[in-house]
Image (spheres, rainbow, N blue to C red):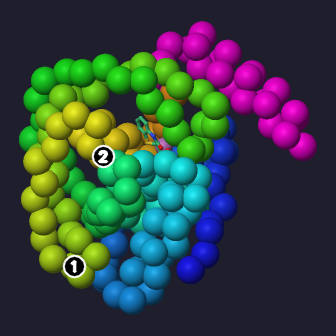
Amino acid sequence: MAILNILHYPDERLHTVAKPVEKVDDQLRTLIADMAETMYAAPGIGLAATQVDVHLRLIVIDISEDKKGLQALINPKIVEMDGKTRYEEGCLSVPGIYEEVERAERIVVEALDQHGKPIRLEADGLLAICIQHEIDHLDGKVFVEKLSRLKLSRIVAKLKKNERKSM
Ligand code: GNR
Ligand code: NI
């Protein structure tokens, strides 16, 4: 297994729209295992392939506390959404920034699992928020871009300052 490098905002590669996975094979399962290891090491509750510079529609999620809830979603598609909720989100690609954003409260997602089997998932609460955050990454969107331009420009300035300090 391997820990992969996570791209940091405002890296342009985070704006890449990911392509559908065509074949769920051992090579893809190795990527899933590496993404899971990277997510747990960070630590985070989700990771999109986009964040590790692989532009395929693949996400891993584990919102459990004991690392026993790992779920890989391949070619995920939201087929139903309702309600609205706000939550203070963070992102491994935007380190140290936490901001409230609005999402659908409840979603139904169709995807393939790591064996290529179609699954349908009903989610609410943190799981629903996390899945929407990850699918946004696959569409080249980062959560801070949902904020006002003023807030975003302050965040970019803060990120630049923090990067300098960590060098
Ligand atoms: O670890 C993460 N925590 C989190 C908290 C609130 C809303 C979304 C997230 S996802 C984030 C990991 C990440 O950046 N995934 O893309
Ligand atoms: Ni993120």
Question: Is label 2 in a helix, a strand or a loop?
Answer: helix
Image point 24% across, 21% down: which residue?
85
Label 1 sits on residue: 116
Looking at the image, residue 114 sits to the left or right of residue 67; the answer is: left
Quarter-of-image position of residue 161? top right
Q: Nearer the viewer, residue 71 or 101?
A: 71
Image point 60% across, 10% down: which residue?
150
Predominant SS of the magenta segment: helix
Q: Amino acid at mark 2?
A: Ile
In space, the residues marked 2 and 1 are separated at their CA atoms by: 19 Å
Looking at the image, residue 40 sits to the left or right of residue 117; the answer is: right
Q: Residues within 10 Å of mark 2 (few under 14, many from 20)?
A: many
Question: Is label 1 in a helix, a strand or a loop?
Answer: loop
- Note whether residue 25 is visible: yes
First-in-chain label (2 vs 1)? 1
Label 2 sits on residue: 131
Q: Is residue 38 above or below residue 157?
A: below
Percent position of residue 44, x then y? 49, 48
Q: Amino acid at mark 1?
A: Gly
Query: Which residue appears farthest toward the top when viewing the image?
Result: 150
Query: Which quadrant of the figure shows ligand 1?
Result: top left
Image point 65% across, 22% down: which residue?
155
Tell me if the residue at label 2 has its CB under 8 Å from ligand 1: no
Q: Is residue 83 magenta?
A: no
Q: Nearer the viewer, residue 47 or 137?
A: 47
- Note whether residue 59 is visible: no
Q: Is residue 155 above or below residue 32?
A: above
Q: Which residues are magenta?
A: 145-167
Image point 15% across, 77% down: which residue?
117
Residue 149 numbered tag: none
